Image (cartoon, rainbow, N blue to C red):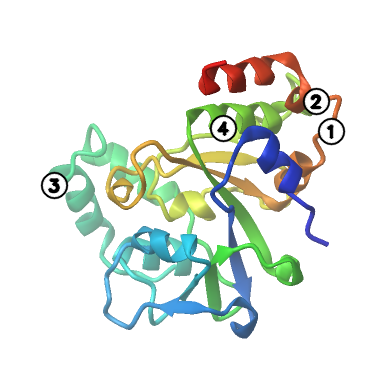
Amino acid sequence: MQPDATNLLRRIGVETPPLGFYDAPEVSPFEPLVRLKPGDSSCIFSFYPNWMKGETLHLTADGYGCRGAGSCLFGIVTRSPEAMVTFLVDEEGLKGSRDLMRRWIDRRGSYRPQHPNLLIGPLRPDQYEHLKTVTFYVNPDQLAALLLGANYNSGPDDPVPVTAPFGSGCSQLLPLFSDLAVPQAMVGTTDIAMRQWLPADILGFTVTRPMFEQLCRLDEKSFLYKPFLRRLRDARAGT
């Protein structure tokens, strides 16, 4: 059963609805849908306005958008490794050397869908079994609160609960998580190639399903109800 995030969102002041990333056998529960036609190389984040209107982006192995999305979300070979190195290093300057980029490409993972349909859009409680990650679109203050929440139950010897890895915006939605069964979060939308599609003051905070459940369990004993957060809200309100 999907936990209720209403209280979490209200306490930290998030009005933008969180989005789910689903791997599902059927698409009808996710309507209304928007689709990418074969050959359409649009960035999936260009559909941010559609998401905000309650529409879900439907991706398939035939319609996935840019070549990067096809590679990281479906494991489709869209260009040779050397061509990718040339594009990312020589043309875009994203690593200090071709060797560094080549080693990163060799290590990176691609998601392998369980079903024909990948869907990104509003949370659908009745489809919770197919939910893979949840992304909050937040300002810096809200990001700080979610970072604190992700660390709330983490000890010094536990795995790092939050990462901010190098990668494309779409890879930060799912493929860069090493284990979806672990409560973990990722600061995303740090890919400057896709940030043009988002408001300038917004970052993504993507969490696995166990971390989503952990965040939704934060209660009156947590920082959500304590003076630090209260003073921050008051300062922003000018009181």
Viewer-proximal residue among 87 and 65: 65
Residue at which label 4 appears? 142
Q: Which mark is residue 222?
A: 2
Residue at which label 1 appears? 219
Amino acid under disc 2: Ser
Q: CA distance from mark 2 to mark 3?
A: 47 Å
User: Do callouts 1 and 2 mark residues in contact (Cβ within 8 Å)?
Assistant: yes
- Find numbered disc 3 in the image and state the secondary structure of the residue it sits on: helix
User: Do callouts 2 and 3 mark residues in contact (Cβ within 8 Å)?
Assistant: no
Left or right: residue 63 compared with residue 12: left
Q: Please report the residue visible at 67 percent of the width from the left and 52 percent of the height from the top.
A: 180
Q: CA distance from mark 4 to mark 3?
A: 35 Å
Closer to viewer: mark 4 or mark 3: 4
Amino acid under disc 3: Glu
Q: Position of residue 69 (x, y in %)?
A: 38, 63
Q: Please report the residue visible at 20 percent of the width from the left and 58 percent of the height from the top.
A: 83
